Image (cartoon, helix red, strand yellow):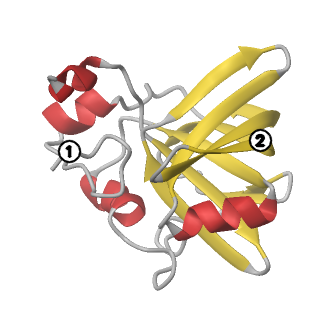
Amino acid sequence: MDLTALFKMSYGLYVVSAEADGRRAACLINTATQVTAEPPRLTVTVNKENVTAGVIDAAGRFAVTAVDITADMPYLGNFGFRCSADFDKFAAYGVAEAAGVPYVPAHACALYVCRVIDTVDVGTHLLFVGEVEVSERLNDEEPMTYSYYHTTLKGKTPKKASSYQA
């Protein structure tokens, strides 16, 4: 089987965030997808070992921002290669709230706030199905694709990413 064929699937980069019990968490993902238009629903997939997965599960809500092409490697590394357990990912880039859910407006071209309506265990990751409560265009920049991240920025794939291959 040629698993590199999966690299031909189109992805974007997103920061998913949540807050529960006084704890905020966020992480960079490439697996956010619109699944229905009426009602509007999204899915996000987060590694079970990420603090963010537990915070989303406890909160029952999450925010997703579509990362735009102005994002640089320090920004992407902040959310993709650090752990919310021992690092405040919001500190360097600021935090805003929409419908009571924290998100990072820096380098984000769109925002979606969702209420979790289902959680599916897909092995190493949890797939959260969310009904969109808030959606907003934040700027007119183009969203960053996963291909752009790899080919233009020369970014790496973290081990906890759903697309990681050893």
In which image quadrant can residue 104 be found? bottom right
Residue 137 shows in the view: no
Secondary structure under tag 1 reads loop
Look at the picture and state if 40 lies above or below 16. above
Q: Amino acid at mark 2?
A: Asp
In the foreground, 73 or 160: 160
Q: Earlier in the sequence, mark 1 or mark 2?
A: 2
x and y percent of residue 10 in the render?
A: 36, 20
How many residues crowd around disc 2 within 10 Å: few (fewer than 14), some, or many (20 or more)?
few
Q: Residue at x 43, y 36 (%)?
A: 68
x and y percent of residue 15 in the render?
A: 52, 49
Q: Amino acid at mark 1?
A: Gln
* Residue designated by label 2: 118
Report the side of 59 relative to 107 (left or right). right
Q: CA distance from mark 1 to mark 2?
A: 27 Å
* Residue designated by label 1: 165
x and y percent of residue 16 in the render?
A: 58, 51
Look at the picture and state if 93 lies above or below 69. below
Look at the picture and state if 146 lies above or below 158. above
In the foreground, 125 or 154: 125
Q: Residue at x 14, y 32 (%)?
A: 151
